[in-house]
Image (tube, rainbow, N blue to C red):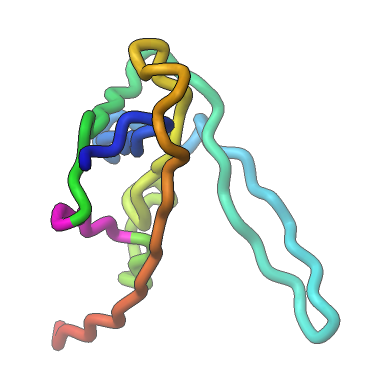
Amino acid sequence: EPLEKTPLAVCDATSVRDEDLVCLEQRFVDRTGENYLAHHASRQQWYYYPKMKIDEVLLLKTWDSKEGLSVSDRFTFHAAFQDPSSSADAPERESMEVRCLCIFDN
């Protein structure tokens, strides 16, 4: 059964500029980290995957440690959103995130 409620949208990284980003400091017991949020800019290009099926997946870059990259080139902004064309009684979305580490020689 295809997903109808709160589909996943991704932003084309080439349409995001560093000035679109807001750094969010995360404080943990043993360290301080950071995460980034993006505020809206009309140049950003967002795409979504309507009616995804259980056997379909997306692979997103969630971090790139390569030196010299702009912040916006390090990851892919993504979010679920309320699709106004969704049926009111559509089943709730279920999401699973799996991470994998890729190491390349320079």
Q: Main secondary structure of the magenta part?
A: loop
In this rendering, position of residue 75 left or right of residue 47: right
Q: Position of residue 69 (x, y in %)?
A: 33, 57
Q: Nearer the viewer, residue 33 or 3?
A: 3
Return the residue nearer the eye: 104 or 49: 49
**Count of numbered circles on the image:** 0
Residue 34 picture location, percent across and down: 65, 61
| Image-quadrant location for residue 50 | top left
Magenta highlight on residue 56: yes
At 42% from the left and 32% from the top, the residue drawn is: 6
Residue at x-position 40% and y-position 42%: 78
Q: In the rendered view, would you say 41 is above or below 39?
A: above
Of residues 2 and 70, the one drawn nearer to the viewer in this rendering? 2
Q: Is residue 97 above or below residue 56?
A: below
Q: Identify whether 65 is placed above or below 35.
A: below
Which quadrant of the figure contains the C terminus? Answer: bottom left
Q: Which residues are magenta?
A: 55-61
Task: Tell whether position 47 is magenta.
Answer: no
Residue at the outermost right position: 29
> Is 100 situated left or right of 93 in this image?
left
Farthest-out residue, front: 89
Q: Residue at x 21, y 42 (%)?
A: 1
Q: Residue 91: percent from the left, percent from the top?
A: 42, 36
Dividing the picture into quarters, in which one does residue 47 lie? top left
Q: Between 32 and 78, which is closer to the camera in this rendering?
A: 78
Q: Position of residue 62 (x, y in %)?
A: 37, 61
